[in-house]
Image (tube, rainbow, N blue to C red):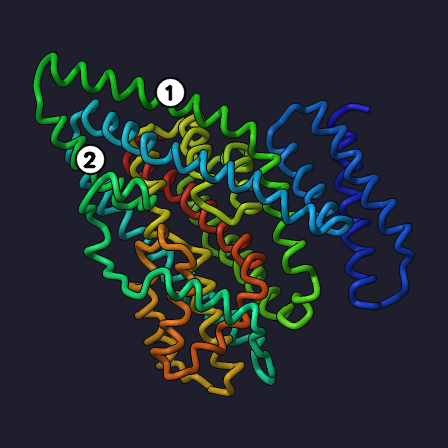
Amino acid sequence: MDNRKILIALLALFFIDSSLHIVNWMELTAISSVLLHVVRWAFIGLLGLYAWRSKALTVYILLCMFLGIEVAEWAPSLAKELKVFSDIFLRLIKTIIAPLLFSTLVVGIAGHSDLKQVGRMGIKSLVYFEVVTTIALLIGLVAINVSQAGVGSSLQAQTEQVDKANKLMEQKHTHNVILDIFPENIAKSVADNQILQIVVFSILFGIALAQLKGERKDKMVHAIEGLAEVMFKFTNLVMLVAPLAVGGAIGYAVASMGYGVLHDLLKLLVTLYVALIAFVVVVLVPIGLLVKLPFKKFWDHISEPLSIAFATASSEAALPKAMENLEKMGIPRKVVAFVLPTGFSFNLDGTTLYLSLASVFVAQVSGVDLTIGQQISMCLVLMLTSKGVAGVRGASFLILVSTVASLGLDPQKAFAILAIDAFMDMGRTSVNLIGNCLATYVIAKWEGEV
């Protein structure tokens, strides 16, 4: 059997498995647990064969995702312990980000000495980011107003969610959008993984280096370029751990929360995912058509970092591989190094859509009917508060709480959402990554670099 036939069989088994589980979950008819497990393990076994034959990292990541879910079902205590693989992976990724961003940005700026292009890319990026995220906010509003997911709900936060919310709210109470862009200590920015501050420092360093002349500049650029190449090799080594990290992350999420919480908040979860898919289809795909994006080539290069982003719910985990793959796609390193990390602070499409949707959901649960004017006013606030907080733990929840409070609602009504936050985070992080990879291609196209 060749790989194409295996792939077709995999898709058929996945469809059958999903259909059986949905029918069983909705209690439309009783389905034997033996049948469910046989179909599921047939799918996993065939996926393992396909992974072994294709040797593709993306397939191994998908295989470990399904294995992680199985471990969570049969041995939840063990699944929780497997999170250590995810933690190791994320730690290694964080060691890559700062030197990788620094080296690629500096070489991109100083190596070409086109400071005007840096300014042009900055302006074009910010305009693009603001337009697209504003549309995302509006789609979130439309989706929740249509589904009315919170109307009539008596949802209450459990003790576990209240404790988690309080811990998150202790992380950071203030956020100055402008001030937090600039580093006060680059070592502190690196330690805190403040991506935007690292980008700003690297840009200024690159501009300063570009002003040097002669041998000193050449030696420095050559050395930093060598650092960039080493960090890409470092990334390839760390990616070997990615399948285990993904399996550990997904297993931990399922074992910790289980599927039971989905029943109470299923309508909200479905509304979010439908809205995210609609955003991709209605906004991102037309943008791709407008700039003549080679969709198949684009998908082939982002599928691997996308699977990592979805399973770990972390944009940072996917950033190094996304940078490497976009460069392989033909986008110049100077554009990738500037636009992609900046986008993870200013172009969080999935997160901004979620924030507008979740804010209105909390109002609906509270029995408050927000007027169109109030919802538009809320969006204007979110346009500012959702920027530049990528490095803050639990940032989206903190913004949600502050937005709900500004509407005069009880912030504790938002705590219950934390029960399914991990599942929602997977979706919004994936859309964040797709949006930023597309933005990188768009800016490169506008600059005539592709």
What residue is disc 2 on? 117
Q: Mark 2: give few (<14), some (14-19) or many (20+) Cα within 10 Å.
A: some
Name the one closer to the observer, 132 or 400: 400
The location of residue 422, given as percent across then percent down, is 56, 57
Residue 281 lies, with reference to residue 168, above or below; the image says: above
Numbered tag placed on residue 230 in the rendering: 1
Residue 342 appears in the picture as rendered: no
* Disc 1 versus disc 2: nearer the observer: 1
Which residue corresponds to the image point at 80% horizontal and 37% vertical from the top-left? 9
Q: Nearer the viewer, residue 422 or 76?
A: 76
Q: Amino acid at mark 1?
A: Val
What residue is rendered at 42% in x and 41% in y?
A: 437
* Chain-order first, disc 1 or disc 2: 2
State which quarter of the image contains the C terminus.
Answer: top left
Residue closest to the eye, 186 or 434: 186
* Kind of element beneath mark 1: helix
Tally of numbered discs: 2
115 sits left or right of 285 in the view: left
Q: Residue at coordinates 47% horizontally, 87% vertically from top-left?
A: 368
> Is 47 in front, or is 127?
47
What is the quadrant of residue 226 in the picture? top left
Q: Please give the name of the residue rendered at 47% of the width and 63% of the height, measured from the top-left corner.
A: 354
State left or right for residue 41 relative to residue 153.
right
Residue 55, position as x, y percentages in the image? 65, 23
The residue type indicated by label 2 comes to Gln
Q: Quadrant of residue 147?
A: bottom right
Q: Where is residue 114 drawn, in percent x and y?
A: 17, 29
Badge 1 crowding class, 10 Å Cα cut-off, few under 14, some 14 to 19, many 20 or more, is: some
